[in-house]
Amino acid sequence: MFAAKLLVVLCASAFLTIVTGDFKMITDRSGTTPSNPEPCLRTCGGHTGFRRTVWENASTGTVYTNVDMSDCGFVTVPLVTISVDGSSNHGYTVGSTSVYYLTKNSFRIFLSGEVHFASRSHTSYSSYTTDWARRSRWSLMWLALGYIC
């Protein structure tokens, strides 16, 4: 019983440390010292969701998705980092850390590549498609650091 209570206290302590953690932006997207006051700095993040991410075809072998982060309440364009999640082949994509069309409310990511199918007799290739992205449960985990005042 004591071990269970100790675990609850430790988990609560870790949660409070995360929630009240100290963040400081050294330089903004232009590489300069930000002029906004530090109390206005917010870290906001999310996950587009397995089988919920809307993938679109951009060109042969390239798919994209848009991420809405308007609920973060940023007043300027934030710094954004992303990671692609999924059940297969997401680790072989090209462009998985490249953010496009970044605004204070949204961004887009393009993923390119080919799926390789190998057997004893031959290897075949297929370009990425929206169907492949959905079947492979591709989604995005993202974090943004920006100002809300």
Image (cartoon, grey):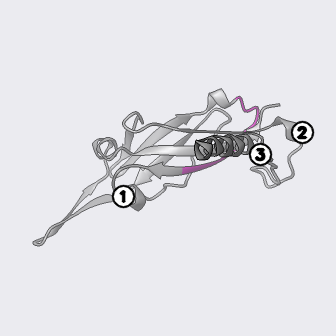
Q: In this orientation, does residue 78 appear?
A: no
Secondary structure of residue under mark 3: loop
For badge 1, the amino acid type reads Gly
Mark 2 lies on residue: 37
Task: Report crowding for label 2: few under 14, some 14 to 19, many 20 or more residues within 10 A (C-alpha).
Answer: few
Quadrant in which residue 52 is drawn:
top left
Magenta highlight range? 73-82
Q: Are marks 1 and 3 in contact (CB under 8 Å)?
A: no
Image coordinates for residue 55, horizontal then vertical, percent: 39, 38
Residue at the spot of label 3:
21
Which is more toward the observer, 112 or 26? Answer: 26
**Does the magenta stretch mainly form a helix, a strand or a loop?**
loop
In screen coordinates, is 11 left or right of 96?
right
Q: Is residue 78 magenta?
A: yes
Percent across and percent down for residue 123 are: 18, 68
In terms of image quadrants, where is residue 147?
A: top right
**What's the amino acid at mark 3?**
Gly
Question: Does 43 appear above or below 91?
Answer: above
What label sits on residue 49 in the rendered view? Answer: none
Secondary structure of residue under mark 1: loop
Alpha carbon separation for disc pair 2 and 3: 17 Å
Q: Residue at x 47, y 51 (%)?
A: 84
In space, the residues marked 2 and 1 are separated at their CA atoms by 42 Å
